Image (spheres, rainbow, N blue to C red):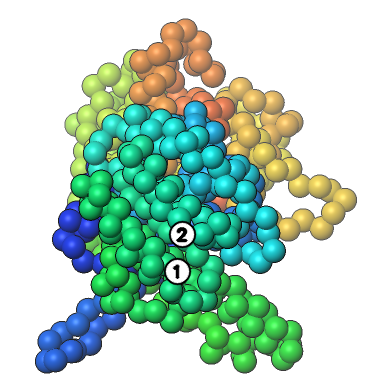
Amino acid sequence: MTLHNKTLPEHRRGKLKALLAEGKLVRVLEAHNGLSGIVADQARIEGTANGKILIREFDAIWESSLTDSAAKGHPDIEVISFDSRLHTINEILAVTGKPMIVDGDTGGDPSAFEYTVSKLERAGVSAVIIEDKVFPKRNSLEPGTTQTLEDSEIFAAKIKRGKQVQMTTDFMIIARLESLIAGVGLDDALNRARIYLQAGADGIMIHSKSKESNEILEFAKRYRSLLNELETDRPLVCVPTTYNFIVEDQLHKAGFSIVIYANHLLRSAYKAMVETAKTILSNQRSFEADPLCAPVRDIFEAVGFLDIKKKDQQEKSSTNIAVIIPAAGEAPDIQKKIGDLPKAMVEVAGQTLLARQVQALNVNHLNDITVVTGFSHQKMRGEGLTFLQNKDYKEGSELHSILLARDKMRNGFLMLYSDILVENPIFSQLLACQEDIVLVVDNSIQFLEPVAGKIVDYVISRNKKHRLRRNISFAHQNTVAKIGKRLDPALSTHEFIGLAKFSKTGAEHFLETYEDCAKNFEGKIQEAQDVSQFRLTDLLQEMIDRGFNVHYLEIHKGWLEIHFPEDIRLANDLYQNSTKLSTH
């Protein structure tokens, strides 16, 4: 899992050399994607030997050309681009902590190889192994395939070019000898090893597709003599895919420093997938295939989902999403009726509007409530609330009041206009939404005539319903295309009621977009003359224009806006006759 392996490239890169310096055999397993990388990184067995605890695990990861290509459905003929390979490499590095050795095929032409070395070293890869065949190569294990070796001096020049662009001494370039694969014998292999070592290769890999280990053991014996002659010490690597009877202790005793199991995870996965598919087809159900499959929970655990679930549960028990209520503005349409009271202090059936909002929020376990005041600040009251004063409320808009409470946005927040009453279930539905930004919108505006003197936050949905088809509403399709006060009512599909939810990520995007606008824009922007007059709907439209998804929760009743004196009378009647709102 990513968060368990927070390994920086500079910390990972030198791990292979450190392991080789210890003198133990380095055991390496293939990986071809993130999940197989987790298996290679975490596979571990424990036992006892002679009364002592014995632990075995893999020391490093082999990113194989064969298995990377096969996992993508392509043959191993260097048809997969290096950038595609690099994507897989980074995918594995992100979820593992062990050093990685990359199968570099032929390395391409010398100029391309320079870039390969540079990119792999930067990513934190410990070594690349390149084979001395002519580009494009053919897989070494396929019988009957013609294998054409590269001129040894040309290949040596490629090694030199790669070594020259290295930035650290941690990264290794290992030369893979294909002489035994091509059938030209041990002498050719030894001669090439000498040339490559003198060119600066950090090690040698000897490859063989024989089912017997005799020839690679003989090469190892002669390689030790070559190292003595050259007065150097460079690791020897083998890949016992075909000669798989030999055990690691024998290989290490023979002089091998690294043993690579180069394709076994993909091969075993492929076999299991084919068997599982056939089992389901044979039985017309999946019950019989279950023994072939890992439990879903095991996959969840491997990729870190259970950790996320645990953290989510901890956060839910220890944090409470904040609610911000902007209540700073005056209410000219009802000011004669309520005097110098803030609108939030209007009484509805014996309780203030604010108290009724708080009651509905508390029912939904929302207790961290911040009210931003302005007009008649001293007359605002409410138990268990945090009050912030917007002294400049006449100069800005509700957005600037909301932004005064930005410290409350850290883990996401709900925003509720101070002049609306909302049924309890609507809060519950909104809290259940998983999208980063969700607005509660009413679709009944399509069937109502505009009310004179009332400013409406119009919404145009991105996905308009087709009148001639059966309408199925998928929540993920409910996104806003346009929002604003000056949209054509005839084109509008919804009205934003003044209730919204922002996740932690949504809140971050919300603040970042505003800060960018405030810093870099002058003059008219969206419907505002300048950023100082920015309203919430202007910022939301700016986010939509920048590519952020603003989703909506659609309702058609269950809320009431207190805008005119008759709205207060209606609210009183509703609360006196019922314990809940049933109309807008």
Residue that carries the numbered disc 2 in the rendered image:
186
Q: Amino acid at mark 2?
A: Leu
Q: Is residue 369 above or below residue 290?
A: above
Q: Is residue 491 above or below residue 105?
A: above
Res 264 visible: no
Label 1 secondary element: helix
Residue 339 lies, in percent from the top left, at 33, 28
User: What residue sits 41% from the left and 19% below the top?
Assistant: 517
User: What residue sits 54% from the left and 19% below the top?
Assistant: 526
In the rendered structure, the answer to whether residue 334 lies left or right of residue 8 reads: right
Residue 190 disc label? none
Q: Amino acid at mark 1?
A: Glu
Q: Are marks 1 and 2 in contact (CB under 8 Å)?
A: yes
Q: Is residue 165 above or below residue 138?
A: above
Give the camera-side residue of 214 and 274: 214
Residue that carries the numbered disc 1 in the rendered image:
215
